[in-house]
Image: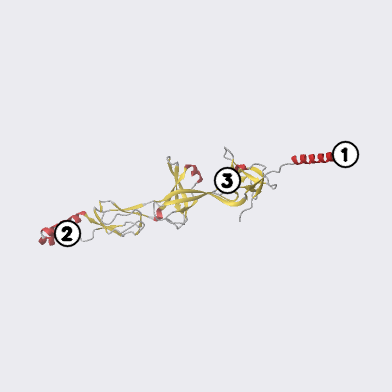
Amino acid sequence: MLAAMLAIAMLAGCGHTKSADESAEAPTPNPVMLVTAAKAQTQSMANDLRLLGKTVAARHVIIRAPTPGRVLGVNLRSGDKVHKGQVVAHIVNREIEAAQAGLAVARKIDPHDADQLTASVGRYNHSAGIPVVAPESGVVSQPPVTAGQMVADMDPLIDLIDPANLYIEASVPLSELSLLRPGMPALLTTPIRPGAQIPARIVAVMPTFDANSSTSSVRLDFAGSERIDAAGEPVEVRVETSHSSDATVIPIAALFQDPGADQYHVFVIGQDGKLRRTPVKLGLRDAARAQVTAGVKPGDQVVTSGGYALSDGLQVRVAEARQ
């Protein structure tokens, strides 16, 4: 009886030891990382080059003083239109002013002879001054002289420009000059007309280089009826340098740069939920998207979070997008 009880106890002990061994040898489950992801899509993409420039008048008409004297009757401001033959001011000759000043003194000294002197001065100066006539039509560019200002012979009074002869000159970094060529369309924006997009076209790459800023210049003409009428106005020029209507596009957040190299890779999520580190070749890029020309096809799901904690073969689970 005692022997039977000892045998039962030994069998029970042996069975408990085996269960512990089996528990210790059970495999540890692989970790699953929670990530965000996006699918590669076919979209239209373009690369834009943005340049700073200004409007330039191809031709100026400077109206000058026909004689030394005082300017009277000028009431023009920058932006005003002037027509050919229009009287824009009068110049009172200095000799007339001197005679009138002497006449005032003569009236005080000898009132009897002052009438005869007044008649003489009146015959000599029978008008408000020498008229200044615009030789051509145009728009006032620079602020003109003010009424009452003294000028010398041939001093500039008013600077006129023809808005039809305005063009745009923009600076281009030398590293991007090869992207531009005559005939390329462009869009202009300017702070003087918020929200407006004015069509233009590159007509020439200027043969000038600035060694200090490492830039060159391009000339653009207005390409439609919408124009800027003022010279020297700042503009931003946007030129589309390349375009693809069916680019394979992924978010910029999905790109990872290889250390010490100008190469990139992404992590594609396989059907089994594991990552596949995939080298890619890039094409067009903007602030939020990148075109992939090799390595990823439309519909592939690429990881957009996790950074350098990601690795090839890692099991992941895609977080549901928040509504």
**Placement of 258 over or under 52, stated as above or below:** above
**Placement of 207 over or under 118, stated as above or below:** above
Q: Position of residue 259 (x, y in %)?
A: 58, 38
- Circles 3 and 2: CB atoms closer than 8 Å: no
Q: Nearer the viewer, residue 78 or 60?
A: 78
Q: CA distance from mark 2 to mark 1?
A: 158 Å
Q: In this rendering, would 144 be left or right of 248?
A: left
User: Which residue, given by chain and number where applicable, does mark 2 sit on?
Assistant: 121
Name which quarter of the figure residue 130 lies in: bottom left
User: Which residue, given by chain and number where applicable, does mark 3 sit on?
Assistant: 283
Circle nearer the viewer, 3 or 2 = 3
At a point 63% along the width and 44% down the height, the residue shown is 267
Q: CA distance from mark 3 to mark 2?
A: 83 Å
Q: Position of residue 110 (x, y in %)?
A: 10, 59
Q: Secondary structure at mark 3?
A: strand
Q: Secondary structure at mark 1?
A: helix
Tag of residue 2: 1
